[in-house]
Image (cartoon, rainbow, N blue to C red):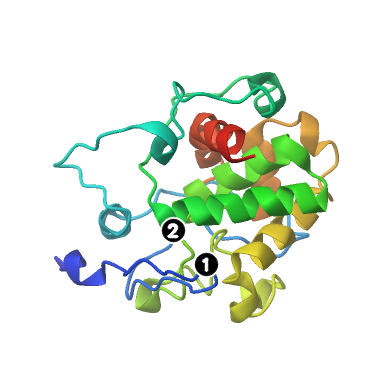
Amino acid sequence: MKLDFTRWLPAIAKDRRTALSIAGVAALGGLAFGPAAVAAPVTSGPHEGARAAIDLATGKSRESTTVESGLTMGSRTAAVPADKPSKDDLVPRGVEGAQSRVPLDDAQLANARAIVEEAKRTGVGERGAVIGVATSLQESKLYNLGHLGAYNDHDSQGLFQQRPSSGWGTPEEITDPRYASRAFFDALKNVHGWQDLPLTTAAQTVQVSAFPYAYAQWEEQAADIVQQVW
């Protein structure tokens, strides 16, 4: 059945605590099970309808091109002040595989800043911030998504697509960017040796996504964003 995805474009929330809702859209990356869960098996990728709706929700189209510049893209050419973390600290192992990038609007940048601030508060530092931003880029494209309706990936919501039914918190809590980020980082700190793991392994151990290798593609943009907003 061909569906009209244009009616699912969300209005960008002015309040970072307000979750976006796209009725009838599946979650993009996978779903975050409980904080102590074990890895899930690899399955097929998100269906075409979900990809189309996410493209529209993030202002991206396969038929159009996007101008990339400055912080909106976490640009590799943007000036970086001397007091910012180095790329060696942000990406100590180098990126793995082909990298993806998306343009960022004000709402996405505000959510990225919230993730970075919680990385500082929880003590996971620059590297943890990169893992958090990359994870949210995969799960929600840095949008604070509410319940997605009939095609919702279980009860996954928020920046990290965390599930209330799996112990991540109430819907109100996990659609608070700061709470969701703190919950993610608290779980990350329970992953033995997470600082030395590949990004996608660290993220997957927390998220238990059906698409465990998808996080790696966002490492470069996540590092650029963290470096610029740190």
The answer to whether residue 145 shows anywhere in this view is yes
SS category of the residue bearing label 2: helix
Residue neighbourhood size for the residue with mark 2, other residues' Cα within 10 Å, grouped as few (<14), some (14–19), many (≥20): some
User: Where is residue 88 shown, x and y percent of the image?
Assistant: 69, 19
User: Where is residue 192 shown, x and y percent of the image?
Assistant: 85, 41
Foreground: 207 or 92?
A: 92
User: Where is residue 119 shown, x and y percent of the image?
Assistant: 73, 48
Give the distance between the C-alpha atoms of the residues marked 1 and 2, in whole angstroms: 7 Å
The answer to whether residue 39 shows anywhere in this view is no
Give the amino acid at mark 2: Ala
User: Where is residue 159 shown, x and y percent of the image?
Assistant: 54, 60
* Residue 209 sits above or below residue 172 on the image: above
State which quarter of the image contains the N terminus. bottom left
Residue in the picture at 40% in, 32% down: 70
The part of the image, by quadrant, that contains residue 166 is bottom right
Residue 61 falls left or right of residue 226:
left
Residue in the picture at 32% in, 54% down: 58
Residue in the picture at 54% in, 63% down: 161
Give the amino acid at mark 1: Arg
The mark nearer the N terminus, 1 or 2, is: 1
Q: Which mark is residue 96?
A: none
Foreground: 12 or 101?
A: 12
Q: Which residue is mark 1?
A: 16
Residue neighbourhood size for the residue with mark 1, other residues' Cα within 10 Å, grouped as few (<14), some (14–19), many (≥20): some
SS category of the residue bearing label 1: loop
Residue 91 falls left or right of residue 190:
left
Foreground: 40 or 127?
A: 127
* Residue 172 sits above or below residue 153 on the image: below
Foreground: 166 or 227?
A: 227
State which quarter of the image contains the C terminus. top right
Q: Which residue is mark 2?
A: 107
- Given contact means CB atoms under 8 Å apart, are the residues at marks 1 and 2 in contact? yes
